[in-house]
Image: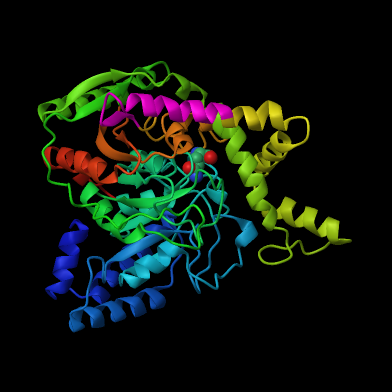
Amino acid sequence: MIESSLSQMGAALRAKKISSVELTQLYLDRIAQLNPELNAYITTRPEASLAQARAADARIAAGTAEALTGIPFGQKDIFCAKDWLTTCGSKMLHNFVSPYDAHVISQFNNAGAVNLGKTNMDEFAMGSSNETSHYGIVKNPWDKARVPGGSSGGTASAIAARLCAAATGTDTGGSIRQPAALCGISGLKPTYGVVSRYGMIAFASSLDQAGPMGRNAEDLALMLNTMAGFDERDSTSLQREKEDYARDLNKPLNGLRIGIPKEFFAEGLGSDVAKAVEAAIAEYKKLGAVIVDISLPNTRLSIPVYYVLAPAEASSNLSRFDGVRYGYRAPAYTDLADMYEKSRAQGFGAEVQRRIMIGTYVLSHGYYDAYYLQAQKIRRLIAQDFVEAYKHCDVIMGPTSPSTAFKLGEKGDDPVQMYLSDIYTIAVNLAGLPGMSIPCGFGDNNMPVGLQIIGNYFDEARMLNVAHQYQLATDWHSRAPQGL
Ligand code: GLN
């Protein structure tokens, strides 16, 4: 059952071939067995999950089940979930039990899905290896000496190890796509504004977007159907007609124009990754697609632009963690200012403190024009490159990450090396575009390689179609790590 797609699982549940309680217990047993080593989940509450499963079984019996009713999912620990410890990977929120549900969580709850637990992540979603979590590193199930990617590393590891049917992630600069690539699974970051950010702990609000992660494109489409939709509690949530993201899955790809940006195949790309991505593009030609050479000249600036803008927004968003209202408070202090300082110095990890300091600096008087404003202008140029490119192609393809999963500890001391792992993903967030990653082979170390598919605004249904047709023709997405 754990190798079935979400629609097969849903059908089996509705046909009463298996109950939600049985399916949930199966995953809980796998979590009990494998999570102590992988550390993909920060929190599980088996009783709460089983209570949801019982409610789902009642709904199935009553004949009111929906597509996801009774299916067990993991939820990234960045989403507030009522009565669940919600840490965002930080010591700062080590004792925060959320009094309410994020929009994404209530959408899953309303659909009758089961919450299996809160998945591990980089602290406040800052990182590319899941090594900045206060709750410990997460291991890649394909090779436990390697990182799962980040910041949605717990989600990616849990899916690859079959510790859930699928799970949620968030992507500010690549945090859905890069861990999906490194763990051999599929993940999609929607167009900015498609999924409500209400109750999703903010990192960089103009870039943050939640999305589905799972084993194949068809599963992502079903999840996105549940996750997407207007929510008046998020001022950037878009008021659009509800769509069925699975509607185009089976369209043939004849005549699809795939743009290949030359900047994505330049220096810095691992030759094993390049080989797998080129083979995937060749497969697309067999499926009837045509290749168009394009250029995204300003994307080379996306890392410096992101590392001005994201820390600037983070420094503002994270000012709410002050030891007063919730979260960590230093045990000893002399006065209010000292309490703020000590709580923040002790509650935040090194990477988060680095970002807060950079952000405060670029927003400060005298530097604002030189850094923040300049970065905003370049952000517009980066977005403009895509507008130009989409005059000539329907989707853009390239690698998701320059390398396969690196060794735990390998890049920990060098923030710039770590930042470079998002070189192909960040421009998509800066432009607000949808992007996804699907497995397309294995590299030199037998670690998975991800193919990135970037769509035009609101073109998620087409991207899912493009991914699904490839997954019908190949089997990379159904490979599973052995010997766990
Ligand atoms: N790795 C990037 C960072 O550290 C992106 C993180 C994300 O998308 N949340 O900021």
Query: On screen, 182 above or below 30?
Result: above
Toward which corner of the image does residue 62 lie, by quadrant?
A: bottom left
User: 363 or 58: which is nearer to us?
Assistant: 363
Number of marks in the rendered image: 0
Q: Pinpoint residue 141: horizontal percent, then vertical percent.
A: 34, 47
**Color style of the picture:** rainbow
**Residue in view at x 47 percent, y 21 percent:** 298
Q: Pinpoint residue 156: horizontal percent, then vertical percent.
A: 37, 49
In the image as oriented, which residue stretches furthest toward the right? Answer: 334
Query: On screen, 137 above or below 433?
Result: below
Q: Is residue 53 left or right of residue 154?
A: left
Q: State the quadrant of the N terminus.
A: bottom left
Toward which corner of the image does residue 369 lie, by quadrant?
A: top right
Residue 413 appears anywhere in the view: no
**Residue in view at x 42 percent, y 47 percent:** 139
**Residue in view at x 62 percent, y 40 percent:** 311
User: 60 or 27: which is nearer to us?
Assistant: 60
Residue 92 appears anywhere in the view: yes
Q: Pinpoint residue 47: horizontal percent, then vertical percent.
A: 40, 78
Q: Pinpoint residue 147: horizontal percent, then vertical percent.
A: 43, 41
User: 183 or 199: which is nearer to us?
Assistant: 199
Magenta span contains residue 253: no
Q: Which residues are magenta?
A: 377-399
